[in-house]
Image (cartoon, helix red, strand yellow):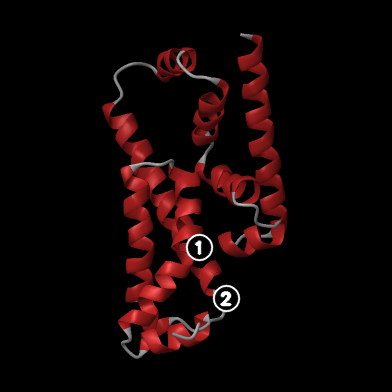
Amino acid sequence: MSHRNDEELIRDAQKGDLTAFKELVKQHEGAVAGVVKSMLGATEEAADVGQEVFIRFYQSLSKFKGESSLRTYLIRIAINLSLNELKKRKHRRSFFTSASEGDQVAATEHKMDLKEWLEYEFNQLEPEFKSVATLRLVEGYSTEETAELLQIPLGTVLSRLARAQKKLRSRLQFHLKN
């Protein structure tokens, strides 16, 4: 089987070729999974969101015009669905939380090693900061690529990244002192 590029595979998938669509999924599922896991952790919800990305893509396949690369398009869907999941989590957490958040944080911090603690703190970032930090620091996208993926101005990427790093640095300094 000859290796077809994304444009050829998309064109064939739009004509109903399921093998072409499966090849697109195979080529891009790693990038999508990386972003979703960085946003949500290795959870059942992350797996569901990863699958939902490709379901949404399949549903919108006929409308895909290739104005951005397929990877950019899929990462954008992944970020948006991950942000939606984070909002749902926050709502569920606030609805079901009985102990104060401070008590939970204190109890949780005592049981973690540094790597777990850093992951925990990263996951506590507000979604708009977490999405920028995930793309820039975890996934290695450039500032320009991050701005394109999130469809926000370059200056917003830079300020959100700086604020995310400041929050993490502050929490790390606090943690190291205690």
* 126 is higher (above) or lower (below) than 94: below
Give yes or no for contact between labels 1 and 2 (Cβ–Cβ under 8 Å). Answer: yes
Q: Where is residue 91 drawn, in percent x and y? A: 33, 38
Q: Residue at x 66, y 62 (%)?
A: 145
Amino acid type assigned to the residue bearing label 2 in the image:
Ser
Q: Residue at x 47, y 13 (%)?
A: 106
- Whole-angstrom CA distance, mark 1 to mark 2, is 10 Å
**Residue that lies at the very extreme toward the bottom in this rendered image:** 15
Q: Where is residue 64 drawn, in percent x and y? A: 45, 81
Q: Is residue 85 left or right of residue 37?
A: left
Disc with the residue nearer the chain's start (1 vs 2): 2
Q: Residue at x 67, y 52 (%)?
A: 157
Q: Secondary structure at mark 2?
A: loop
10 Å neighbourhood of mark 2: few (<14), some, or many (≥20)? few
- Frontmost residue, 150 versus 14: 14
- Frontmost residue, 26 versus 66: 26
Q: Where is residue 110 drawn, in percent x and y? A: 48, 12
10 Å neighbourhood of mark 1: few (<14), some, or many (≥20)? many
Q: Is residue 24 left or right of residue 92?
A: right
Q: Which residue is mark 1?
A: 76
**The C terminus lies in which quarter of the figure?**
top right
Q: Where is residue 101 drawn, in percent x and y? A: 41, 20
**Residue that lies at the very extreme toward the left in this rendered image:** 96
Q: Which mark is residue 68?
A: 2
- Frontmost residue, 58 versus 116: 116
Q: Secondary structure at mark 1?
A: helix
Amino acid type assigned to the residue bearing label 1 in the image:
Arg
Q: Toward which corner of the image does residue 142 lie, by quadrant?
A: bottom right
* 72 is higher (above) or lower (below) than 111: below
Total marks placed: 2
- Frontmost residue, 66 versus 158: 66
